[in-house]
Image (spheres, grey):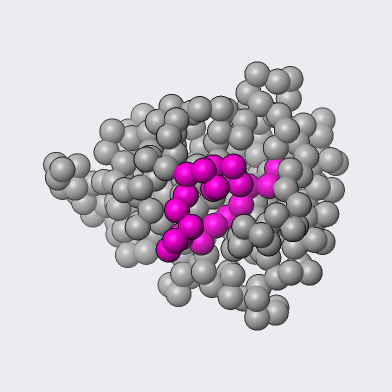
């Protein structure tokens, strides 16, 4: 691995071998998502607690201060929306020149294994890897399932993660599921958990994140369950304690309840 690739990965995965990414890329297919209408205001109190920001180039330019920025994982796929026929019908949206111009630490794109657009999304991933490897830029593959949430089981996610790694992704982002260790065991690159749909309670979020970390995940890429929470800073800090301080569910839950009382 070249120095540049090692350097960029070290900015994402911290010295303890773990990471907490904050995604705010939801608008690329959802539009003005609830509580993300003004992304710059939403992330301002949260940035100091994340290790990197997952964002599109448009929001990066419009809402993220370039001075002292956190490392940027640039979302570079898109082309479909929630009101379209199929979320899996995506293409690469950002050139390698733009990736370099924006000084991205890494890039991320979705792959839709098993969909009607499986081949297109996987060949898009391979093409992105081909371009980014020449410049030492890590690619994070996101194992997306569109609207078919029932696919979130260990067998399917393990298949999708392994294929993404085989095609050259340096990191894979996937959903937590029962028997999550089986997903991680079959994937030769670091696995980061996705947040998925909003959970009913903050305790539920802490529980699944703790389980995933105990079963091999290197970290978390979670947005809606943080910035749609009534107490976003408190849950962000509690999850960071699970990831970077090995806190138990009980310890993280107690921290959350203490912090949510603070202004």
At a point 62% along the width and 76% down the height, the residue shown is: 6
Residue 12 in sight from this viewpoint: yes
Q: In this view, does 204 lie to the left or right of 178?
A: left
At a point 70% along the width and 70% down the height, the residue shown is: 136
In the image, residue 185 lies in the stretch drawn in magenta = no
Q: Is residue 112 left or right of residue 38?
A: right
Instruction: Determine whether 230 is above or below 208 in the image.
Output: above
Residue 37 image point, x, y percent? 45, 30
74 and 183: which is toward the camera: 74
Residue 46 image point, x, y percent? 35, 49
Magenta segment, which residues? 57-77
Q: Quadrant of residue 228?
A: top left
Tally of numbered discs: 0
Q: In this view, does 19 lie to the left or right of 111?
A: left
Residue 248 image point, x, y percent? 29, 56
In the image, residue 62 lies in the stretch drawn in magenta = yes
Instruction: Determine whether 41 is above or below 209 in the image.
Output: above
From this viewpoint, which residue is outermost toward the bottom? 3
**Where is the C terminus found, in terms of image quarters?**
top left
Q: Quadrant of residue 50?
A: bottom left
**Where is the N terminus found, in terms of image quarters?**
bottom right
Residue 93 image point, x, y percent? 74, 43
Residue 213 in sight from this viewpoint: no
At a point 77% along the width and 32% down the height, the residue shown is: 89
At a point 43% along the width and 34% down the height, the residue shown is: 38
């Amino acid at each position: 691995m070249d120095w540049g690739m090692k350097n960029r990965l070290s900015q994402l995965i911290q010295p303890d071998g773990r990471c907490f990414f904050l995604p705010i890329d939801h608008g690329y297919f959802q539009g003005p998502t609830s509580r993300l209408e003004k992304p710059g205001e939403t992330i301002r109190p949260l940035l100091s607690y994340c290790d990197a920001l997952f964002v599109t180039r448009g929001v990066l330019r419009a809402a993220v201060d370039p001075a002292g920025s956190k490392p940027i994982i640039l979302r570079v796929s898109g082309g479909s929306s929630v009101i379209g026929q199929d979320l899996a019908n995506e293409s690469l949206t950002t050139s390698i020149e733009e990736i370099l111009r924006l000084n991205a630490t890494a890039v991320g794109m979705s792959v839709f294994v098993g969909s009607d657009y499986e081949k297109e999304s996987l060949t898009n991933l391979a093409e992105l890897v081909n371009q980014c490897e020449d410049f030492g830029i890590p690619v994070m593959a996101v194992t997306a399932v569109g609207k078919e949430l029932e696919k979130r089981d260990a067998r399917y996610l393990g298949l999708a993660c392994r294929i993404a790694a085989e095609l050259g992704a340096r990191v894979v982002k996937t959903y937590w599921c029962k028997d999550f260790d089986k997903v991680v065991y079959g994937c030769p690159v670091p696995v980061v958990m996705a947040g998925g749909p909003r959970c009913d309670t903050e305790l539920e979020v802490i529980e699944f994140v703790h389980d995933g970390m105990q079963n091999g995940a290197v970290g978390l890429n979670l947005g809606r369950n943080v910035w749609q929470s009534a107490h976003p800073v408190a849950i962000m800090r509690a999850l960071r304690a699970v990831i970077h301080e090995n806190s138990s569910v009980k310890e993280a839950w107690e921290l959350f309840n203490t912090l949510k009382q603070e202004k």
